[in-house]
Image (spheres, rainbow, N blue to C red):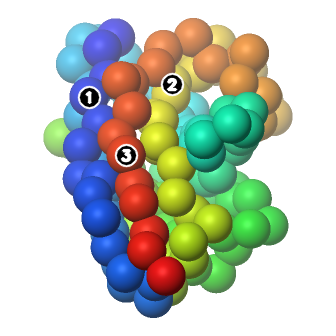
């Protein structure tokens, strides 16, 4: 499967952005999906995730209550709505797919086998 992330940009603190990740290929609806982010000079970290059905979502403590992950399996797309953005949210955001169909939901970079190219989010103070 190929993943194409979009929607990043420059926004002021307190603003909002909506990221999209479009998948091509079969079986998207069976994959758990996640958004990771990587700030300059830091390791890539989990930000938000959603299981294959869309029934369960997961968030890092740092984004809980501000970010919302969702998916549209009919359109093979996963979204990340980011509200109340902070300068510390500045990073390149990557969408990733876990095709293993294992339970429980996975949170580690090493456990995802498909990655998008990343979209840059910059939050100014």
Q: Residue at x 61, y 52 (%)?
A: 48
Residue tagged by mark 3? 120
Query: Between residues 61 and 9, which one lies in front from this camera angle?
Result: 9
- The answer to whether residue 98 is seen in the rendering is yes
Query: Between residues 37 and 77, which one lies in front from this camera angle?
Result: 37
Q: Distance between the residues labelled 1 and 2?
A: 11 Å
Q: Position of residue 124 (x, y in %)?
A: 43, 74
Residue tagged by mark 2? 97
Q: Which is in the foreground here, disc 1 or disc 2?
A: 1
Q: Position of residue 2 (x, y in %)?
A: 30, 14
Tell me the element at label 2.
strand
Q: In which quarter of the image is residue 95?
A: top left
Instruction: Indicate which disc, 1 or 2, sits on the residue closer to the N terminus.
Output: 1
- How many marks are shown on the rendered structure? 3
Q: Which residue is drawn at 30% across and 64% down?
A: 10
Q: Which is in the foreground here, disc 1 or disc 3?
A: 3
Q: How far apart are marks 1 and 3 (CA)?
A: 13 Å
Q: Quadrant of residue 34?
A: top right
Q: In which quarter of the image is the N terminus?
A: top left
Residue 4's disc is: 1
Tell me the element at label 3.
strand
Q: Where is residue 22 in the image (x, y as percent from the top left)?
A: 24, 34
Q: Which residue is drawn at 74% across and 15% down?
A: 110
Q: Position of residue 56 (x, y in %)?
A: 63, 55
Query: Between residues 35 and 13, which one lies in front from this camera angle?
Result: 13
Instruction: Indicate which disc, 1 or 3, sits on the residue closer to the N terminus.
Output: 1
Q: How far apart are marks 2 and 3 (CA)?
A: 19 Å
* Vertical placement of residue 96 versus 12, above or below: above
Q: Which is in the foreground here, disc 2 or disc 3?
A: 3
């Amino acid at each position: 499967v190929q993943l194409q992330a979009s929607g990043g940009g420059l926004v002021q603190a307190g603003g909002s952005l909506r990221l999209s990740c479009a998948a091509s290929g079969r079986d998207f609806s069976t994959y758990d999906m996640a958004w990771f982010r990587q700030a300059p000079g830091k390791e890539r970290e989990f930000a938000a995730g959603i299981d294959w059905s869309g029934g369960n979502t997961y968030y890092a403590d740092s984004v809980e209550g501000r970010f919302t992950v969702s998916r549209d399996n009919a359109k093979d797309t996963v979204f990340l709505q980011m509200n109340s953005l902070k300068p510390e949210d500045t990073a390149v955001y990557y969408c990733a797919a876990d095709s293993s169909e294992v339970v429980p939901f996975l949170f580690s970079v090493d456990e995802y086998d498909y990655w998008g190219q990343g979209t840059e989010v910059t939050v100014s103070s």
